[in-house]
Amino acid sequence: MLGGVMLVVINLLPIAGVVAFAKGASRLAASLIVIPLGVALVIGGYSHFLSPGSDNVLRMPPHGLTLEMQISAALLAVLEALGSWLGVKMLSRRHV
């Protein structure tokens, strides 16, 4: 139960970041975007591309959903990388 609640909260952090950005709190917004997406990128990147486990999309045995898993893992990595990059750009931005 607690794990499910934490999962929901972590997934809502980037949305809270967008809301904070709309209200003018750009440093808070950047933190709320870059932290969860960066962590997910590192964990997912290891799990789906580097680990020797069954979640590695480069070593999956062919079956009915192999291609779909490979596409979704690649798209997720791209979206998490773009979100992390956006958050870092927001953090590095100077206010006048």
Image (cartoon, rainbow, N blue to C red):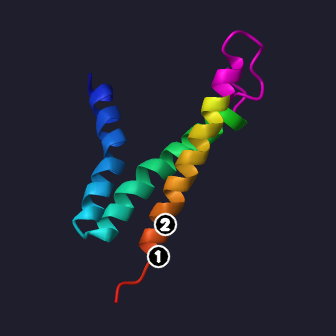
Q: Which residue is drawn at 22% across and 65% down?
A: 23
Q: Distance between the Cα atoms at labels 1 and 2?
A: 6 Å
Tag 1's secondary structure?
helix
Q: Which residue is drawn at 49% across and 62% down?
A: 86
Q: Which residue lies furthest to the left in this view?
A: 23
Asked which quadrant contains residue 60, the reply is top right
Tag 2's secondary structure?
helix
In the depicted view, which residue is nearer to us: 24 or 60? 24
Q: Quadrant of the N terminus?
A: top left
Point out which mark residue 25 bears.
Answer: none
Asked whether the beta carbons under mark 1 and mark 2 sit within 8 Å of each other, the answer is yes
Point out which mark residue 92 bears.
Answer: 1
Q: Over which residues does the magenta segment extend?
A: 51-70
* Residue 57 shown in magenta: yes
- Dominant secondary structure of the residues highlighted in magenta in the image: loop
Q: Name the residue under label 2.
A: 88
State left or right for residue 65 relative to residue 37: right
| Mark 1 nearby-residue class (10 Å; few <14, some 14–19, many ≥20) | few
